[in-house]
Amino acid sequence: MPALGMKPYDQLPVADGRRQIDEGAAALFGEPDPVESVEDRVADRVPVRIYRPAGSGPGVLVYFHGGGWVVGSLESHDRLCRTLAARSGVAVVAVDYRLAPEHRYPAAVEDAWAATRWAAAHFEPVVVGGDSAGGHLAAVVALRARDRGLPLALQVLLYPVTDHACDTPSYREHASGTNLTAVTMRWFWQQFLAHGEQGAEPEASPLRASDLTGVARALVVTAEHDPLRDEGEAYAQRLVDAGVPTTLTRYEGQIHGFIRMPAVLDAAGRGIDQVADAVHAAVHATAPVR
């Protein structure tokens, strides 16, 4: 990443950070798997990009990109979404939710929910997923879906943000030296929230939700060398304790964001395959008979 000239996002103007993640995506990911079609739409006022693989069957993965709610876009995650669609055989709807600091919490949550409702009206069954800040949005959408009667087949949480406290052992162990530092993550939170007290709200910190009973079954992926590792694993344990069928996989030796880096990290391909297989299985296990 230094060879690509990439810098910590807290050390860049926001516009430069957004440009950096988009422009660096190709070198980190490499060539994506091909899909049959790509279509940009507006889903209940939220821009989305729909990827349809060849011979796609039922269902959809609604995907929320990472980037600390500040950076990231349809472009930064385009190659990942293409490849997930191709390998799962399931359409992917990538969501271009509003970013902070121009649009602070709960704007991203509202956009994620609106796009998921739109997808549910056009596809069946529905999986939600995302990486990092997008994993946070997927977890919150799964909570809303339970409370508002929208059935989900699966939630895929890739090294998700689940708590505002930033005080776990992994925050101390991996505070610096990798692509996501504790300083950068705290900076993301400062951009995201209008005021710090919002961090205690369950839709900002889903780990603080009082009850996870009845949410969609989950796949939670964490990385060993990641400040967010412990809060992701704590959320997986909360799901298990609530009786939610949950698969937790920690990728040893990996850093935050590794799934977007198959050109440089072999584990990324394994992670993508795990997600694609889980999405395929969830969709076909719950798909209605036509």
Image (tube, grey):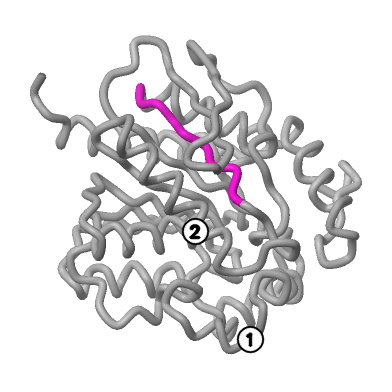
Residue 203, given in percent of the width and then of the height, sits at 45, 72
Q: Is residue 105 left or right of residue 214?
A: right
Spot the residue most to the bottom.
Answer: 197
* Mark toward the viewer: 1 or 2: 2
Q: CA distance from mark 1 to mark 2?
A: 19 Å
- Residue in view at x 39 percent, y 82 percent: 208
Location of residue 58 (image quadrant): top left
Residue 278 in view: no
- Residue in view at x 55 percent, y 43 percent: 46
Residue 108, given in percent of the width and then of the height, sits at 56, 58
Q: Is residue 91 left or right of residue 110?
A: left
- Residue in view at x 40 percent, y 11 percent: 54
Location of residue 235 (image quadrant): bottom left
Label 2 environment density (alpha carbons within 10 Å; few <14, some 14–19, many ≥20): some
Of mark 1 and mark 2, the one earlier in the sequence is 2
- Start-end of magenta stretch: 89-97
Residue annotated with mark 1 = 196
Q: Amino acid at mark 1?
A: Gly
Residue annotated with mark 2 = 110
Give the numbered dot on residue 95. none
Q: Is residue 143 left or right of residue 75?
A: left
Q: Is residue 120 or residue 169 the one in the foreground? A: 120
Residue 289 in view: yes
Against 156, residue 238 (above or below) is below
Q: Amino acid at mark 2?
A: Glu
Against 274, residue 97 (above or below) is below
Is label 1 in contact with label 2 (beta carbons under 8 Å)? no
- Look at the image and say whether residue 39 sits in the magenta stretch: no
**Label 1: element kind:** helix
Q: Is residue 4 or residue 122 the one in the foreground? A: 122
Against 37, residue 127 (above or below) is below
- Look at the image and say whether residue 92 sits in the magenta stretch: yes
